[in-house]
Image: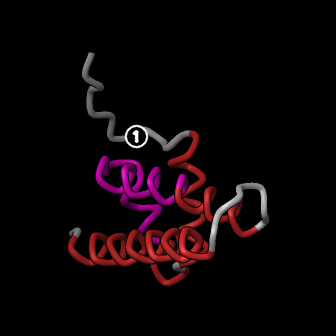
Amino acid sequence: MARSYDSQRSFKGTAHKGLLRLMMKLPSLRERLQLLAPRSRTLENYCDAYGEATAMLERLENGQESAGEDLVEEYRAICSEIENDVIRYCRTQT
């Protein structure tokens, strides 16, 4: 069943954690993220991906997951790419 659009929905789970992490990482966009979050599925998807990627990066950096430095660098790059995508997205929304 398709989810209907809810202009007042709030992010949950990983998307919520990703949103909070993005607001900490990108303080200049904090207000913009808060305004867009309740009405943007695209931003929700970015936040969900960011929440997953940063959680995995944390586990890798803390040694909870075994991996080589290449995988750590790959996750750092993924997080950076998502941050850049979010910055571009926020700047294009009116």
Horizontal relation, residue 23 to residue 35: left or right: right
Residue range corresponding to the magenta coloring: 31-52
The percent coordinates of residue 87 (x first, y second) are 35, 77
* Disc 1 crowd, CA 10 A, few/some/many (<14, 14-19, 20+): few
Seen at 54% across and 77% down, the residue is 73
Q: Determine which quarter of the picture holds residue 55.
A: bottom right
Residue lying at the far bottom of the rendered structure: 28
Horizontal relation, residue 67 to residue 73: left or right: right
Secondary structure under tag 1 reads loop
The percent coordinates of residue 32 (x first, y second) are 41, 70
Q: Which residue is mark 1?
A: 8
When the figure is inspected, residue 14 is found, relative to residue 62, above or below; the finding is above
Seen at 23% across and 68% down, the residue is 93
Label the magenta part by its dominant secondary structure. helix
Seen at 43% across and 65% down, the residue is 33
Q: Is residue 43 magenta?
A: yes
Looking at numbered disc 1 in the image, what kind of residue is underneath it? Gln
Q: Determine which quarter of the picture holds residue 65.
A: bottom right
The answer to which of 57 and 39 lies nearer the viewer is 57
